[in-house]
Structure formats: C-alpha cells, structure tokens
Image (cartoon, helix red, strand yellow):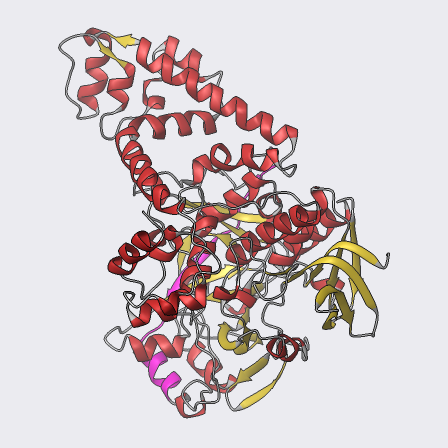
Amino acid sequence: MQSTYDVIVVGAGHAGCEAAAAAANMGCSVLLITMNMQTIAQMSCNPAMGGVAKGQIVREIDALGGYSGIVSDKSMIQFRMLNRSKGPAMWSPRTQNDRMLFASTWREMLEQTPNVDFWQDTVSHLFIEDGKLRGVISGLGITFRSKTVVLTSGTFLNGKIHIGEKQFGGGRMSEPGVYGLTEQLVDLGFQSDRLKTGTPPRIDGRSIDYSKTEIQEGDKEIVGFSYMPVDKPKTQRCCWITYTNQDVHDILKTGFDKSPMYAGRIEGVGPRYCPSIEDKINRFADKDRHQLFIEPEGWNTVEIYLNGFSTSLPEDVQLKALKLIPGLNNVKLFRPGYAIEYDYFPPTQLSKTLETKLLEGLFFAGQINGTTGYEEAACQGIMAGINAALKVNSKPEFILDRSEAYIGVLIDDLISKGTEEPYRMFTSRAEFRMLLRQDNADIRLTERSHSIGLATDERFSLMSKKREDAKDLFGFMEQHKLEPSDANDFLVERNSAPLSQRQKLGQLVLRPNLGINDFRFFPLIKEKLDTLTDASIEYAEIEHKYKTYIQHEVELVDKMKRLEHLKLPDSLDYRSIQSLSMEGREKLSRVKPATLGQASRISGVSPSDISVLMIFIGR
C-alpha cells in the first residue's frame, strides 16, 4: 500500500469492482477501499445476473473489457436466453449464479490485476485542500491522496434497515452504514435524497416440497455472457416456480399496520418494477395470485432465494404467509426479508463521464446515482473507472451515446432526466433496440475500448475475426444458389413455398421460420458453416434477416446525431431566454445539457423549447 494513487475507488460492490479493474487495466495505480474484504462483489439480493435489457448490459461490459461477464460465466449454475420467442432485439441472456463462487471469483480476478491495492476500512470524508479534491480520509483517520475518486457507496450512506416495527442502522443485514459523507457532500452544495429497496426472506431448501411446484430448467445450449473463451458448466441446477394465493394475501394484510411502508416510517421511494409483496397486493388488488421463483443460491448450499417475495413485514407474519404457499407448507427461514432506505444523489448533478459537476475529479457510480440492480451499477462503474483513468492521463473523455449501447441510454437517462425512484433498465428505454442487440455488443464496443487501452489485443482479435467471418458468410449467401429439385421437399416440409427457379441462399434465409443452419443438410453449406463459430453465424444471420429494420434505425440515428452535435454553451443563461417555457427554463438551468440532443430528452423540455434554443444558437 502506498499513500498516493491515481484513482481511489470507495466501495467494492459491482460498481466499485468494475471501476477499479478498468482504471487499473488502463495503467493507473488504484486503491480499492472496502469495509469488508470478505464481501467484495457480494450479491446482496438475488443470485443472478442479466435478464431483460440487463443481459445486454453485461455483454456490453464484457465487450469493453470488464469482468462481470467472465465472473458470471465462471460462477453460473444455470443459463437461459430469455425472449427467444420474440425478435433478436429482445433476446436477453441470464445466469443463475453461485453467490459465494461469484464473489470469490471477482476477488481472485481483482487480486490478479496489476496496479490494484486494497484497504479494509470505511471512508469518513473526502480530503479537500484549497477547494480541490485531493483524496479521502478513512475511518481510522488515515489520509490517502489521489488525483481522482470514484464513490460507489451502494445502500450504505445513512442506511436504515426495517423489519416490521423494528428499525436499525445498516447498509446491509449485519453490516454498518456509513455516516458523514452525505453531510459533507451536502455542505459542498450537492443535493441528496432518500430511496428504498428490499430483499426477500432466505429459506431452507430442505424444507421445500418441490413436487408441489413447477420446475424451470436451463437452456440446453449455454451461450453465456463473455465473448472470451470461458469454460461453461457441464450440468445445471434447476429453479422452480410457485404462486401466492388469496389466503397468503389475507395473512400478509394482517401485518400492514406494522409495515414500515404503510406506517410512514420509510421516507424513500421504492423500485416501481420490483415492488414488495405487500406493494403488489395493494397495487394489483384484482390479482388473486403472484408468481414466485425458487432460486438456489449455489452448487453446494441448501439456501434458497424466494424471488418475488420482497418484504419488510414482521418476521412472524412473513413465516405464517410463507407456510400457505404451495410447496412451502413446512418452510424454515434462514433470515426474514427486510427493507433498507439510504441516501442517493440525483444524477442530474453529473456529466456524461459520471464526474460530478460541482467537484472536479469526483465520480459517482451505482446506487448512489439512484439506480437499482447489479448490472446497472457495474456498467456505471466501468464507465467511471475508464473516465477517471483518462482524466488522470489528460486524455479525451469516453462517452457512449444512446445509439451505441444500453450503457449510453442509462447514463443519458440519468443525467438528463434524473430519477425519483430506483432506476432499472428495460429494452423499452432504448430507441434503437435492433442496433443494441446482445449478439453484437463486441462489434459495437470492443474496437472503441481497445483504442483507449482497455480491451486486450486478444479480445480485439476475436472480435475482428467474428466480423470478418460474418462478412465472408454474407458473400457466401449471396453467391450460393439452390436448385428447386434440391430444396423443394425440405421447403414443403417446413410449410414454406417451393421454388420455381434457382434462388440465392440469402433469399431463402430471409423467409420466416428459416435460418441458415436449417440448410446444413447440403454438403457445401455444412462445410462452410463448420468453419465458423456459432456466434459468427448468429450475428451474420440476424444482420442479414433484419437488414431493412437495421438500416431504418441507422437513418434515425443520423437524424438524432444532428441534434447531438449541436453544442450548448456552459455559460448559457436559460432563465434569461423569455421564449422558453417556465418549466423548460427551470429544467435546463438545473441540468445544464451539453448538447441540443441531451436537452431534447429532459423531462419537461418541450419541442417548442428546442426550437427556441436552435434559433438562439443560430441554427
């Protein structure tokens, strides 16, 4: 350990780990400060990575050279590609993970990363000298100097845990909160607020009657997250599905008067798209049951995560209700569910690099910015780590826009619109879903990351080969033609119109319910496909089948970028522009958008406001 670093990362959750790894792999000296070395990359809530839109984010992190995809693949106990029945823009990878193996693999990879030092301690204050950020002061009173600081405090800032009428300080169960940092930041002029999240009870898998539940197996083909070669498990663990019922709801309602949410003891707003079970019962009173997922916590443990039953009701009410759920009649608890509220800082106070506008060199990433979810935190972490490293070396900032990555959508949403509830990524938040697919994240991002020194030569080489192989396959599909006599029996069998003349393979692949792998029974086509990876074939086929839609989105991107390239001066006094709406003046003054494109996405800024700004800046 040394006394001065290029980058100090505070917190070793998903955001902090990615930030530390990115900055270190770009050549910076990094100090990662965590309260507990045993909880690095802890899966505080569900033991899973990915899912709808979140899976695309993990693939983007991997394409940039982050670790989340590799760690998830190494620790997976089940893999599923969600939404296969829909178009490829919606396909989303998801892993069920071994919680302990996930954390230990992350720690092992960080310990094997040159330039990363560790320090077990809290951070009580930022070290500011002559109005400049100079580092941090630890709970032990030690001053660590640095050029930049990435703050990833999770749910620990003034964290308060609620179980029924009981409440106590803490950032996670059995872990203390962090006090003092919020107050210092507020004194510096930052705005803070409160949010809430929750977690379900953990139960003993030995007490479950699985015969009364529905089994949920993994996919036969394990795709995984990482574009790098990672060994996949030979077997998978099952999950199961069960449901609440009206009796369960009636028992839960008996505890509502002791619920911290309904009694007003919780100030923070909870996640809209991952509500507590009591919130579901209240908001969806017309539903007589809610789906629950029984998820194993690992290969060698009986601990079960009951996904869908997040709650902060008294523990006795939780247990009584659980015993009325099919399969859980004899259930035993390892620990009750609980809610936690914590401080966050509205992210409109950040620039696109995730550097704070008020204090140069200070970056925020993760739940401190009002997001929820491991994936949302991790992608902010890698972007903050990248930009901290670039700032240290006086290099241009690294920005992803909305047409390049879900990461770009997330960051732009946060800094332009802010959030008053925990922000979660969905595919519906992205305008260009056909461009931002899970299969092409490496094609979109690896070259850019390689150019700034993060993605390795090996990763860049694999991406380049995939791109060239796909180009080669495009040419093959355009050149290779099939005779009616060779193809018609197969086409009729697949309920597809027979040929009246020779037709290019590329034209046949465009037909619904037909893919290039369906034509492997032709020796020449099989020979060609056998030389390519599954990933290259899938990417080429999607690009070919959906090229019209893709081209349409490319044209929309071009239109958007015309606005995006129109810069707005930092010194622009929006309050003095009388032609702007009152709300527009207020929102623009608060956010201070960098471009006209960003201004157009601020909630409350109207199209007429944008027209006024275009005239004002001479466009």
Asked if residue 99 shows in the view, the reply is no
154 to the left or right of 88: right
22 to the left or right of 240: right
Q: Nearer the viewer, residue 514 or 455?
A: 455
Residue 116, image x, y percentages: 77, 50
Q: Nearer the viewer, residue 320 or 209?
A: 320
Q: Is residue 271 above or below residue 61?
A: below
Quadrant for the N terminus in the image: bottom right
Q: Is residue 61 above or below residue 253?
A: above
Q: Nearer the viewer, residue 462 or 50?
A: 462
- Does the magenta portion include 102? no
Asked if residue 126 shows in the view, the reply is yes
Q: Nearer the viewer, residue 564 or 68?
A: 564
Q: How many marks?
A: 0
Specify the quadrant of the image occupied by residue 32: bottom right
18 to the left or right of 130: left
- Does the magenta portion include 243? yes
Q: Who's the residue at 46% across and 73% down the image? A: 310
Residue 288, image x, y percentages: 27, 74
Specify the quadrant of the image occupied by residue 523: top left
Q: Is residue 489 above or below residue 133?
A: above
Residue 447, image x, y percentages: 55, 32
